[in-house]
Amino acid sequence: MTTDDRTSKTGVARRAAGSFSPYTLHVVGIMLLILITAGLGVVNPYLTRPVFDDALFPQSGAPNMPLLWTLAGVMAAVTIISGALGIVQTWATNVVGQRVMRDLRDRLYTHLQGLSLGFFTGARTGEIQSRIANDVGGIQNVVTNTMSSVLSNIVIFVSTLIAMTLLSWQLTLICVVTIPFFFLLSLIVGQRRRRVTAQAQEAAAEVTAITHETLSISGIMLAKLFGRQNQEIERFHNENERMATLAIRRQMTGQSFFTMMQIFFSLAPVAVYVIAGYMLTGSFSPGVTAGTIVAFTTLQFRLFWPISTLIETSVELQSSLALFDRIFGYLDITPDIEDRPNARRVRPSDVRGHVEFDSVRLSYNPEHGEQTVENGARRWALNDIDFDIAPGQLAAFVGPSGAGKSTISYLIPRLYDPTSGAVKIDGMDVRDIRQESLAGIVGYVTQESYLFHDTLRNNLLYAMPDATMDEIERAARAAFIHDRIMELPDGYDTVVGERGYRLSGGERQRLSIARVILHDPRILILDEATSALDTASERHVQAALEPLMRDRTTIAIAHRLSTIMSADVIYVVDEGRIVEYGTHDQLLETCGLYASLYQEQFDNGRVESRCEDGIVMVDGNILPHDDILAIPAAD
């Protein structure tokens, strides 16, 4: 199916109908129930004529009570059976409809989980939540009731039309001549409703996004600290007003049309009475009796009611297509991080931890190629990154903010894929390793540790769901957080609150480290793991990191050079390139960017490094630097 087919009204409708394909047998059963129920629904109105003409007012004069009892019994039985079948039909249609909605939510959530980090950095969380909750929820009535409603009303319409024709084809012709006009108007109204519905859902998504952003702990703290509550209230009020206005427009769109339609249908029996009167008083009276007129007007209501329902349903279907458009819009996003067909499963125990970058380039917008900077030059987010980290080494990446340090680390667990070049673990391209295996190989500790609003135990079990309590406690002790947990009233069953805000920053970070210890990865990435902590918390976290780093390949990203001076190798990153590398002492001797960064941080400290005219001074001593290990800076 082409893009145009997917986004066209017919294509969207076809895809929406395809959501029912897993439940074909259920749908067939529902159709049979509808046929039986609709067929039975015609029986009682059609029996009205013999009730009047043959039982109540026969030509003999006296009511025919045996026949009346028989007809009344049949009508009662039909009513009871129809009611029972209607209950079964309603249950079955709701089961199928809810399962279709469940499948859509599952597909949407599963698909979103498969998208790369780049999608989420460009999307608002509230917008994503709105697609799953509001948009899928908005099609509930259509998915749950439309299938049975359309089919049952078509069957009712056809069967009723046949019964009315058998009673009087002349009156039937008069009744149905205006029906095509109403269906034509319904298409116009439906298209308008679809446009308004799309706007209303966008407004609802904006309200959800504002709510998520401003009522989170971080958002509410920011508003209070900067005194922006009134502005946030005003922003919410404006979007809420817009959503309400569009909701009113959606409800009122075509309301005059529906009113006109209802008035016409209500007056139609009056027209039948008048026309029948002329037929009875004229010379042409083709078998029209009082019973015929009563039965016909009863059937007429059964004819106009499904017509009215079908027209309203067609309008609702037009509206629902706007919601399906938004749902399929997410489902049509192609994941840019996928397992290759021949991707391998790799056990963490078989991994040594050799990490290699081979001529890696990355653009965050690969379809646009290189990124443009203000002066018109071209650059990449990462450009020609080459390095080789031996198993068990501690490699550090330093450099100015925005240089690309974290971006390098994102490529190892495949949060992004390189635009060109290869990222390898033990000689294997990470794209040839299944993502689930890669997640078991690489552990990541970020600057801001994310915790779920759950117990401490469950937050730790996220790394290893089948871990025993002994294993959990060993990991917590290794991270120097066990004693603090035991001081809490509920111990490991303490609920940490939204994003773990009931714990201090250092405690959250140590809990995050305990989670990674439990995960037991072969390659550990520390992304500014201590930069946001105070000195005391940093000491605790550093102590927790020591056992975690032991016997693993560790990649540390840091601004504080004091935390990485003992690294086996330090890579200095600037503007997406590695401009220097070596040990701490070697980089000081090169008088390059690292030495400059070091001087900025330790200008008033024990060590003073000054580079002038090719001379490197450390503590007042001139150091030789003939053997410079750093690679030259990029042009």
Image (cartoon, rainbow, N blue to C red):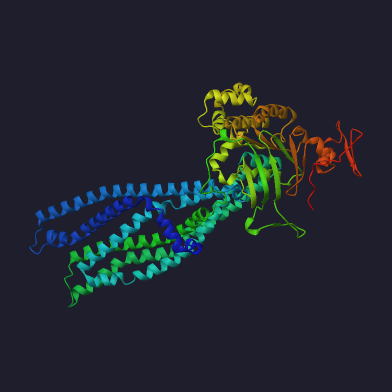
* Rendering coords of residue 175 (x, y %): 29, 69
Q: Residue at x 45, y 57 (%)?
A: 320
Say which of 575 and 541 sits in front.
Answer: 575
Say which of 601 and 129 sits in front.
Answer: 601
Quadrant for residue 478, please give it.
top right
* Rendering coords of residue 593 (x, y %): 81, 43
Quadrant for residue 505, please give it.
top right
Q: Is residue 618 left or right of residue 30?
A: right
Quadrant for residue 306, please give it.
bottom left
Say which of 137 and 345 sits in front.
Answer: 345
Q: Is residue 309 left or right of residue 530?
A: left
* Rendering coords of residue 525 (x, y %): 66, 37
Judge whether residue 452 can be spotted in this image. no
* Rendering coords of residue 471 (x, y %): 55, 25
Q: Is residue 108 left or right of residue 584?
A: left
Judge whether residue 226 can be spotted in this image. yes
